[in-house]
Amino acid sequence: MTETVLSIVPDMEVPDFLVREIQAKLAYVDEAITSARVSPGVEGIELSLNGPADKTTTERLSAKVNHLVEAMADGAFEPRLSVLEDYLDRPTSFAADPMDELYKSREVVREGSGYYILGPLLSALIDFFAERVVDAANQFGAKPYRFPALISPGYLERVKYFSNFPHSLSFVTHLREDMEVIEKFSEDGCCKDGLVHAADGSYGDPDAMLSPTVCHHLYMSLTDSVLPEEGLIATAEGNCFRYESTNMASLERLWNFTMREIIFVGSADFVGEGLEKARDMMRQTLDDMALAYKVESATDPFFIGNYRDQAAYQSAFELKHEVRALLPFKGDTIAVGSYNRHKDFFGRSLNIKQADGEFAETGCIGFGFERLAFAFICQHGFDPNSWPDAPSAHYRRLSEGWHSNNAPDYGDVPSF
Ligand code: ATP
Ligand code: ZN
Ligand code: MG
C-alpha cells in the first residue's frame, strides 16, 4: 500500500489549547488516515494516508478536517488551567523509550491492536500500586464490588455515553441462534489479517457493550434508590475498553486496560472532601514511587460535536483533575489517574436520592494500571534493584516466592 502525506491548512486556525484534542480526534475522521500531526496556528495539519492523496481524497479529507476544526474550535475558549500539585522536577533515572526492550524480553506481548500481555516485572509493579489504592480505599472504609466486563447498552444510552463518546464504544455480538448460521460459521468462518469473516447476516445487533469505565456499574446498581444518611463509598477494579483507533500505540493508549476506582456517592461536600482526602493519600504513594508528575485540571475526550460545550462546563466548574506523569523520552506527560466530579448528573439521570430527598452527587478517583506502570518504567527503568525503595522491596518480596526467576529462552528477537 502506498503511504502518502497530505498537508491541510484548515480555514480556521487551531488554537494552542486544542492541539492535543484535535490531534486525537483526527484518528476518527476518515479510514484513510493512519496518523496525524497538528501544529498550532496557521501551520496546518499533516496527515499520513494509507493510499494516494488524489483529488477526490484530498477534497473529502479537507472538508472533513475543516468540519472537525470548526466543530471544536469555533467559539471555544481557553480553559483555565489550574495546577494543584507539581512534582515534574523530581529526579528520574531513565530516559529512553522502553518499548523495544519490553518487547524483546516479552515482558510486553502485543496480542492485537490496543491489547497486550504484561509479564512478571510489570505485573509485580502493578501489584504494588494496586495494593496502595486498596489501602487508601480501606482507610475510607470503602465497600468492595466486582463488576462485569460487559455493560448494558440501555444504561450507556441513558447516561448519554452513546452521544458523548460514540467514537470509543466497543460492541459485543454473537452468532444468531440459527442452526444453519452456526453450522456455516463452523465450516467457513475464518480469521484473516486479524479480522473475523462470517457470512452476511451471521450476527445479530449487539446486545451488550464492553464497559468503558468502572464506576458506571455502581451508579447503575443504585438506580431508583435512596442513599443512607452517611452516603456511600465503594471500590472496585475492572477491565475498561475504549476504542482509541490509530492513537493506540505502545502501552500509552490501550483498547483494553485495567483500573481501580474509589467511588463516592452522597452530598456535594461528602464527594468533594472524599476526593481531596484521596488525593492526599495518593500523593504519598506517588512520592514513594519517586514519580515525576503534576496534577492539573482537565476535560474528558468528548465526541467532536459535543466537545466544546461539555468541556467548557467541566472546565468552568473544575470537575476533573488529572495526574499527569512525565514520559522523559518524549518530553511530554500522560494522564495516569484522575479525580472526577459529576455533580448530580448520575443522581438525576438514574434517580439516586440522598436521604434528605436531594439528588445524589457522585465522584471517583481512578488510576489506569498499565499507564502508571509504563510511566514508572519510562522514569525508572527495568531493573527492580535500582527502583525506589518501596516498589523495589515489593518486587523482591514477590519474586522470592516464585518457583523460578529464570526466563524462558525466547531465541531470536520476536517479531511482535
Ligand atoms: P486521556 O486524557 O489520556 O484520554 P482520560 O481522560 O480518558 O485519558 P479517564 O477517563 O480520566 O482518562 O480515565 C482514568 C484513567 O484511566 C486515566 O488516567 C488512565 O490512567 C487510564 N486510561 C484512560 N484511557 C486509557 C487508555 N486508552 N489506555 C490506557 N489507560 C487509559
Ligand atoms: Zn469513575
Ligand atoms: Mg483526559
Image (cartoon, rainbow, N blue to C red):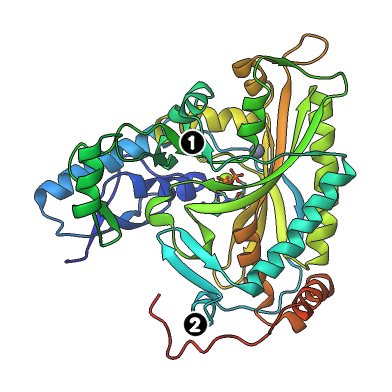
Q: Secondary structure at mark 2?
A: helix
Q: What amino acid is found at the position of numbered circle 2 in the picture?
A: Lys
Position of the C terminus, as image quadrant, is: bottom left
Q: 369 left or right of 114?
A: right
Residue 373 horizontal/vertical position (percent): 65, 65
Q: Residues within 10 Å of mark 1 (few under 14, many from 20)?
A: many
Q: Residues within 10 Å of mark 2 (few under 14, many from 20)?
A: some
Decide which of 147, 28 is in the foreground and name it: 147
Decide which of 181, 142 is in the foreground and name it: 181
Q: Is mark 1 within 8 Å of ligand 1?
A: no
The answer to whether residue 315 shows anywhere in this view is no
Residue 220 horizontal/vertical position (percent): 62, 26
Q: What amino acid is found at the position of numbered circle 1 in the picture?
A: Phe
Q: Check contact, mark 1 vs mark 2: CB within 8 A.
A: no
Q: Is residue 262 above or below residue 101?
A: above
Q: Secondary structure at mark 1?
A: loop
Q: Which mark is residue 302?
A: 1
Q: Is residue 153 above or below residue 251?
A: above
> Which tag, 1 or 2, sits closer to the chain's start?
2
Residue 119 horizontal/vertical position (percent): 59, 72
Mark 1 to mark 2: distance in Å?
36 Å
Q: Is residue 283 above or below residue 416?
A: above
